């Protein structure tokens, strides 16, 4: 269990923060930027949930929890040392990726195929889900970049890739199963 008795510690006053393994790094390091962007995605999911209900809200709640798992995964480098850790580090799993895929497939079965690119918008919920999609895609790019120089759990990258797809399909669902999607009209304002 996590106990936070004091919110400010002053340990980051000089531009450094602690990773999950205790190592101190610059707050602008690629790893911190990647998991910070995951945290940003989680905050936008919270905004989307203000407009969601029922099963979609339950799915978004699971995603928020997964995003905390993902942040915990990304803040812990040295995957090769996981077996030596006093407590096993929390890592994203193939099962979490598979759950997103199953949910995407279930939602997509209710939608007509796309015949045009769509613009972010429509309902308020769809707009927030599109924002979730773009922040998740940015987090994915940052995690992929991080993986070029440090170890990153491949399931973490896969999860982010599927997550942005999940948000896209969920946004279409929020737009009356795609009937209220805002279609892109190429060159419409020339």
Image (cartoon, rainbow, N blue to C red):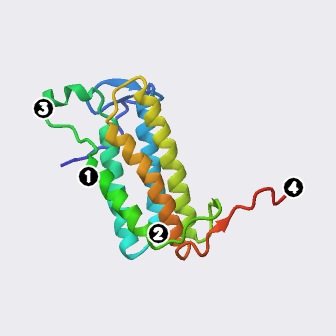
In the depicted view, which residue is nearer to us: 154 or 21?
154
Cα separation between marks 1 and 2: 27 Å
Give the number of the disc on residue 190: 4
CB atoms of marks 1 and 2 within 8 Å = no
Where disc 4 sits, the SS reads loop
Does residue 139 appear left or right of residue 10 in this picture? right
Q: In this orientation, does residue 33 appear?
A: no
The mark that comes first in sequence, 1 or 4, is 1
Please identify, in this view, whether the residue under mark 4 or under mark 3 is nearer the observer.
4
* Mark number, residue 86: 3
Task: Residue under label 2, please give it.
Answer: 50
**CB-based contact (under 8 Å), mark 1 and mark 4:** no
Whether residue 10 sits left or right of residue 183 in the image: it is: left
The Cα atoms of the two marked residues, 4 and 3, are separated by 62 Å
Task: State the separation of the CA atoms marked 2 and 3.
Answer: 39 Å
Tag shown at residue 95: 1
- Mark 1 neighbour class, 10 Å CA radius: few under 14, some 14 to 19, many 20 or more: few
The C terminus, quarter of image = bottom right
Q: Which residue shows up at 58% across the image and 65% down it?
A: 114
Which element type, helix, strand or loop, lies under badge 1?
A: helix
Mark earlier in primary sequence (4, 3): 3
């Amino acid at each position: 269990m996590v106990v936070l008795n004091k919110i400010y510690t002053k340990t980051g006053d000089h531009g450094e923060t602690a990773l999950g393994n205790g190592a101190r790094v610059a707050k602008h390091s690629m790893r911190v930027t990647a998991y910070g962007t995951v945290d940003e995605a989680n905050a936008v999911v919270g905004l989307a949930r203000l407009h969601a209900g029922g099963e979609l809200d339950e799915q978004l709640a699971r995603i928020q929890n997964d995003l905390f798992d993902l942040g915990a995964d990304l803040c812990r480098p040295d995957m090769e040392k996981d077996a030596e850790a006093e407590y096993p580090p929390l890592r994203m799993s193939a099962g979490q990726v598979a759950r997103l895929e199953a949910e995407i497939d279930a939602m997509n079965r209710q939608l007509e195929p796309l015949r045009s690119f769509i613009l972010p918008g429509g309902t308020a919920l769809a707009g927030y889900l599109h924002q979730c999609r773009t922040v998740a895609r940015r987090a994915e790019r940052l995690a992929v970049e991080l993986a070029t120089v440090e170890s990153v759990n491949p399931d973490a990258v896969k999860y982010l890739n599927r997550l942005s797809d999940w948000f896209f399909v969920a946004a279409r669902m929020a737009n009356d199963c795609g009937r209220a999607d805002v279609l892109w009209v190429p060159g419409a304002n020339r």
